Image (cartoon, rainbow, N blue to C red):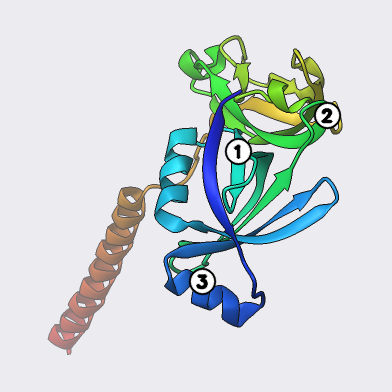
Amino acid sequence: MKTISIGAERRDNTGKGAARSTRRQGKIPGTLYGQGQSIPLRVDRVEFARKLLEAHGENVIWDVTVDGGEPLKSIAREIQHDPITRSMIHVDFQHIDMTRTINVSVAVHLIGEPEGVRTFGGILEHMTRELEVECLPADIPVSIDVNVEDLQIGDSIHLSDLPAANFEFLGDGGKVIAQVAAPTVETATTDEEGEEGAEGEAAEGAAGEGDGEDKKEDGGGES
């Protein structure tokens, strides 16, 4: 399990005003909680963003050092973003005990192209993109890799089908992870057919009008 170090400073003031002031200083307000404590803190925005890139979107253990103290083993439980700018506005770290199990969400990656898609034009549907597992912090999987190459049209993979190594899956075993649906078949009248039909009707109408005029002219000649 990858470990990444991050420095932090304790925040003396809390609340919305203090949080805005912290962000103006290029910091991200946050909290470190767990193990009987709750510490308001702030981390440098640029440094934290760089460390997130280093994590590559994976679950990692964070060594959070507050005001130069001892590193506190933690996981980043939640990173909040501004809904408009998408900039990071808050982070929550959970201080953990490396000897006790924790529950974490792990990304699901589908591996390969299903036979039903490759040969018969089926549609692969990725139904579940994260799974919750229980394990020791050191055993948190980088991702849950699910091989879908053998799936035919109508086949599916459920949570109960997945092997677990040093962790335990949480949730309903019947949860669908991925499935292959039949290709969609469209049956509809084409625009060209519709246009041809309209042109035919217009031609018939024109012909009918012409016949009427001829009859009037013929009638006038007889009198």
Label 2, secondary structure: give it: loop
Label 1, secondary structure: give it: strand
Residue in front for this viewpoint, 23 or 218: 23
Residue under label 3, please give it.
22
**Mark in the foreground, 3 or 2:** 3
Q: Residue at x 48, y 63 (%)?
A: 27
Earlier along the polypeptide chain: callout 2 or callout 1? 1
At which x and y percent is residue 149?
A: 56, 12
Q: Residue at x 37, y 47 (%)?
A: 190
Which residue is most to the bottom? Answer: 223
Instruction: Kindly indicate whether the residue at mark 3 contacts the one at mark 1 (C-beta within 8 angstroms).
Output: no
Marks 3 and 2 sit apart, C-alpha to C-alpha, by 34 Å
Where, quadrant-wise, is the C terminus in this rendering? bottom left
Instruction: Kindly indicate whether the residue at mark 1 contacts the one at mark 2 (C-beta within 8 angstroms).
Output: no
Q: Crowding near pointer 2: few (<14 within 10 Å), some, many (20+)?
A: some
Say which mark, if any, is on residue 62. 1
